Amino acid sequence: MPYEVIVAVGAPDEARTARAIQAQEGIDIVRRCADLAEAVAAVQAGIGHVAVVGTSAHLDRAVVATFAAAHTPLIVLCGDKEVAAMTALGVRATSSPTEAAVLAHALAEDVPQAPPEALSDIPEPPREGRGGRVIAVTGPVGAPGRTTAVMEMAHALGVVEEPALMVDLDTYGSSLASRLGVVDDIPGVIALARAGLSGEVSVENVQTYIRPVTSGCGLVTGLPRPSRWPEVVEAGMDAVWDSCRRAAATVVVDCGPGIAIGGNPGGRDGGALSALRAADHVVVVGAGDPIGIQRLVQFLADMEETIPALPPRTIVVNRVRSQVAGPRPREAVADALARHAGVEEVWTVADAPALADAALMSARAMAEQKPGSDVARSWAAIARHVHQQSLTEVSP
């Protein structure tokens, strides 16, 4: 039985491409599609072993990911000047219909023997050294202090080394720009996701969308409205992290509560999942009250299911206070997490509502508002721990 090839190449190359494929023994054209959208629909329906398509304005990393998920190798027939751009998207590209046919034959033969995970890997753009570290901050619903953690750690890390870069990827309630008093006409995270999809992301591109904030840190602003989450897709963000690493020594990402609400890969939570997979270290933040601890325990279990190869993590319980956790609140929190979630080490931060309100009013981190406070010292210790752990994790 011949291997099946899907063709979606426009004039004037369609006829030449079809003849070249039919001249190859062991492969045959099963579908000649009018456009890229029809080819995508065909592979999603399980048709074809390999696809040969022409260039299109809609061909981006999200489309490439769709072909990879269907275990259908993709070949792009394009002009000589477009080969490099297509290769940057992680696809095989050629300007020769004959070469496309030869590639189609070779790849089609490999499909039955290749493991699905090998076919689903999309090659990343070439890296110019690993660069800085990515620290992803996440946690359950209920406002446990994820954004606070991002701000305080970025401030503390900026004291230890070069200023850190904050990226707001919370698609449910982006707030870093508001917390830091930043007004941005162009949401940075959307612009970078688009550049990632088109294969045009670079260090210069990232630097264009960094807004300076307090402590000398930088901010890539998030969604102005939660309804714009479809503009921050997983495939686009996958291509962004390498350039972010080269733009800053440390990148601290607010991932929001995505996986607590469902962990929808390729959908609303795709950007957060991309950051969590790319991270060198993950900081999980929960609230220091009975409901917050219960949510944190469930969230940790969900993380294990959603991201099996999760990077090393640090557990932080925020706003710990005796009024809701007993006379020895730190010990009570640690005991509960050890018993119900198997957490061996937990970092705690005391509740300081007056300081939090003052910092919010001045659009600053609490460590800037009152450098010598217990809260500032706690976050500084956590930042030093995460900094040291991430240095160990990325060393050869």
Image (spheres, rainbow, N blue to C red):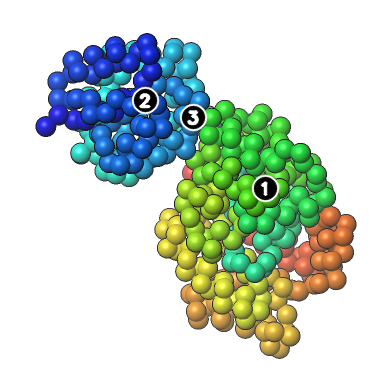
The residue located at (38%, 18%) in the rendering is 10
Q: Is residue 252 above or below residue 356?
A: above
Q: Earlier in the sequence, mark 1 or mark 2?
A: 2
Residue 142 found in image quarter: bottom right
Q: Is residue 261 visible?
A: yes
Q: Is residue 124 above or below residue 305?
A: above
- Name the residue beneath numbered marker 3: 58
Q: The N terminus appears in which quarter of the rendering?
A: top left
Q: Earlier in the sequence, mark 3 or mark 1?
A: 3
Q: Where does label 1 land, which residue?
A: 223
Front-most of 36 and 125?
Answer: 36
Residue name at image x 36 percent, y 43 percent: 69
Which amino acid type is shown beneath numbered disc 2? Answer: Ala
42 or 202, which is in the foreground? 42
Residue at point 51%, 72% (across, down)? 298
Question: Residue 289 placed where, x, y %?
Answer: 66, 79
380 relative position to 301: left or right: right
For label 2, the crowd category at 10 Å Cα-Cα, with few meaning under 14, some 14 to 19 and many 20 or more, is: few
Q: CA gap, disc 3 to disc 1?
A: 23 Å
Which residue occupies the extreme left position in the image? 1
Q: Sequence order check: which comes first, mark 2 or mark 3?
A: 2
Residue 34, numbered circle: 2
367 sits left or right of 165 in the view: right
